[in-house]
Image: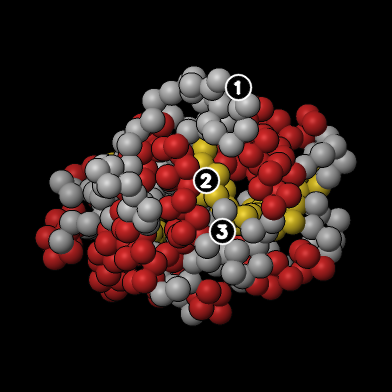
Amino acid sequence: MSTDDLAARLLHLHSEGLAKGAPVAPQVEMASMFHLPGDPAGVPGYGRMDNRTWSALEEALAALEDAPCLSFPSGMGAISAALFSCLKAGDRILVPTDGYYTTRVLSDRFLKALGVEMVLRETARFAEGGFEGFALVFLETPSNPGLDLCDIRSVADAVHAAGGLLVVDNTTMTPYGQRPLDLGADIVVASDTKAPNGHSDLLMGHVATRNADLLAAMRDWRKLAGGIPGPFEAWLTLRGLATLELRLSRMVASAEVIAGRLAEHPGVTDLRYPGLSNHPARAQMATPGFLMSFTLKDEATAERFINDCPLIQPATSFGGVHTSAERRARWGDAVAPGFVRLSVGIEPVETLWAAMAKVLP
Ligand SMILES: *Cc1c(COP(=O)(O)O)cnc(C)c1O
């Protein structure tokens, strides 16, 4: 389905089959108990297993991913479900050195103690060394924060030939920007805290898979470990999804303009933006995204750019309606002190650029 058809379908998904007089908007179902006399089969039973607001959100996510989805109370909740439900003692996993760092910390801090060995590799050289002996390979492309690209299809083929599973973190692209399941990934994980919700007011995440066994295992993990989304957060995320395609098209169009101008700015070096990349894996992305990174002269210059621009929100995280930026070195990422990650928001682009140009060196 084209992006346009998908975006249109998503807006009308919930009204399919509505009873006369029912509210057009999905409702927030606040319930731990459900009225349950007699045989409990086939109806919601208890709030840790069932919630109709999650179901509405998961239907929308499933339409977007073209695959069954489960929602979680954060991106890390989704990533934990994928890792803990697939791995067992004695397994080895491959994780990128330059992906979202919490995934590495989680593996090192908790999976290692359960007998799972983590091996690290750079995204830019991910296929080098092969995938023999890995039960699970975790890939993030574009990587965060360096925005290196990696060809999902060729990694998926090689991982499967070696008998492993491929999990792709698609947070930076969203299903409108990149479709890892179509490229052979077994599981997609994503933080809906970012662009899918888009308003910087909650955390949520989801997993998507076309493998029924993996789906059942991750559903059991959620039910038994108990990390379930709040109904109100699920409702807000569903509301955010309604405008995702609209927001993304503004954010990406603006990012292309801003990246082009930053690339020509004498005070900016090492600008990374997938739209300016000639990497062959660029072809797997439907859009170049709204994230870019670049290096300013030093820490002070970068801090001034981020903090003194009235249209840049200094904050970690990305994908909100407002443009935001941060110096990743403050978290210990292996980048230069003046390295800035910029997430372009929905401000009208010329107004945004004018504000940025005033604080660039
Ligand atoms: C933010 C992020 C996560 C974690 O998501 P939370 O919602 O913060 O738990 C995972 N992967 C990537 C790429 C992210 O950007």
Task: Find residue 255 and report its image quarter.
Answer: bottom left
Q: How far is the residue under mark 3 from the one under mark 2? A: 12 Å
Q: How far is the residue under mark 1 from the one under mark 3? A: 33 Å
The residue tagged 1 is 38
Label 3, secondary structure: give it. loop
- Residue drawn at point x = 28 percent, y = 55 percent: 243
Label 1, secondary structure: give it. loop
Label 2, secondary structure: give it. strand
Residue at the farthest front position: 38
Residue 192's tag is none
Tell me the amino acid under the disc marked 3.
Answer: Ala
The residue tagged 2 is 206
The earlier-in-sequence mark between 1 and 3 is 1
Q: Where 105 falls versus 254 (above or below)? A: above
Of labels 1 and 3, the one closer to you: 1
Q: Where 108 falls versus 125 (above or below)? A: above
| Mark 3 within 8 Å of ligand 1, using the beta carbon | no
Tell me the amino acid under the disc marked 2.
Answer: His
Tell me the amino acid under the disc marked 1.
Answer: Gly
The earlier-in-sequence mark between 3 and 2 is 3
Residue closer to the observer: 281 or 64: 64
- Near mark 2 (Cα within 10 A), the count class, few <14, some 14-19 or many ≥20, is many
| Mark 1 within 8 Å of ligand 1, using the beta carbon | no
Residue 209, given in percent of the width and then of the height, sits at: 62, 55
> Does the image show residue 248?
no
Q: How far is the residue under mark 1 from the one under mark 2? A: 33 Å
The residue tagged 3 is 67
- Residue drawn at point x = 77 percent, y = 34 percent: 112
